[in-house]
Image (tube, helix red, strand yellow):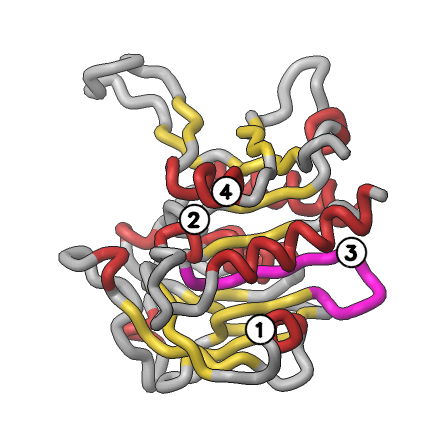
């Protein structure tokens, strides 16, 4: 069987006349840990551009077996009908529109979608949900979920929901440690989404899935691609990826 081809949504460096390279040009890129994580299980990552000219978003997703939404810049509150509470939380509306289009195209074609960090937030908004623009200041009991100084070495516990997809993948409901690099999170859950995991101490939603009987859509708030797969204290990133790839294979065949 040929390797699975996973479309990877791009992060954006918007046109910047002061940037030392590609002055004034828009750059689309992937964080390498994500690509390495996908390739570790034999999947071929394909960075997807914005549809343009004679190429539609349908043309782009026709060439992939599944979609992975990367982390990165904040979502724009305008994408879920709010105003930014602070200028620094204005987010990236252009990237939002691009990724929402990709996600919706894959759902229409029954191509599995996995959202990581921002990707979970994007999926929640895709299905009509909203976000806390800043957990620490807006959630009544929110803990610090992002610390710039330690970055991917900030960890916290999550609890997997009983009878969920993730609980089944990991052998039952359990509490486990994950990498946390986000300051926004789900406020209003999107329609037809179910909670797969919560942050144990402050109950922030940490994983979501589209209800059974529809396309396979899964989002996790943590960064599995940043985690050391050999660290036994962390929730296995390999199990998560294998479980997603199994869903991709089922639908491809």
**First reached walking from the N terminus: tag 3 or tag 4:** 4
Give the residue at mark 1: 170
Q: Is residue 106 above or below residue 217?
A: above
At x 27% / y 74%, what residue is drawn?
137
- Along the line of sight, which residue is nearer the eye, 78 or 197? 197
**First reached walking from the N terminus: tag 2 or tag 1:** 2
In the visual, does 54 lie left or right of 38? right
Label 3, label 2: how many angstroms apart (C-alpha)?
A: 22 Å
**First reached walking from the N terminus: tag 1 or tag 4:** 4
Q: Is residue 11 above or below residue 244?
A: above
**First reached walking from the N terminus: tag 3 or tag 2:** 2
Residue 61: image quadrant is top right
Give the residue at mark 4: 40
Q: In this picture, which residue range is highlighted in magenta? A: 210-222
State the image coordinates of residue 106 (x, y, percent, origin top left): 73, 43
Give the residue at mark 3: 215
- Along the line of sight, which residue is nearer the eye, 58 or 81? 58
The quarter of the picture where the N terminus appears is top right
Give the residue at mark 2: 71
State the image coordinates of residue 62 (x, y, percent, origin top left): 76, 30
The quarter of the picture where the C terminus appears is top right
């Amino acid at each position: 069987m040929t390797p699975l081809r996973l479309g990877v949504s791009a992060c954006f460096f918007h046109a910047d006349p002061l940037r030392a390279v590609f002055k004034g040009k828009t750059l689309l890129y992937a964080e390498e840990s994500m690509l390495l994580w996908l390739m570790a299980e034999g999947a071929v990552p394909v960075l997807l551009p914005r549809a343009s000219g004679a190429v539609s978003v349908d043309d782009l997703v026709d060439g992939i077996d599944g979609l992975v939404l990367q982390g990165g810049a904040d979502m724009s509150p305008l994408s879920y009908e709010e105003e930014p509470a602070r200028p620094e939380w204005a987010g990236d509306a252009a990237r939002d529109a691009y990724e929402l289009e990709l996600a919706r195209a894959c759902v229409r074609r029954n191509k599995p979608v996995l959202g990581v960090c921002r990707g979970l937030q994007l999926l929640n908004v895709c299905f009509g949900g909203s976000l806390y623009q800043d957990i620490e200041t807006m959630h009544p009991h929110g803990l610090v979920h992002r610390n710039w100084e330690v970055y991917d070495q900030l960890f916290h516990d999550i609890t997997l929901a009983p009878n969920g997809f993730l609980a089944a993948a990991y052998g039952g409901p359990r509490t486990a440690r994950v990498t946390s690099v986000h300051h926004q999170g789900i406020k209003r859950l999107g329609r037809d989404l179910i909670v797969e995991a919560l942050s144990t101490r402050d109950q922030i939603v940490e994983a979501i899935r589209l209800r059974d009987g529809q396309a396979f859509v899964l989002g996790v708030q943590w960064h599995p691609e940043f985690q050391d797969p050999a660290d036994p204290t962390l929730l296995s990133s390999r199990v998560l990826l294998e479980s997603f790839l199994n869903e991709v294979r089922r639908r491809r065949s």
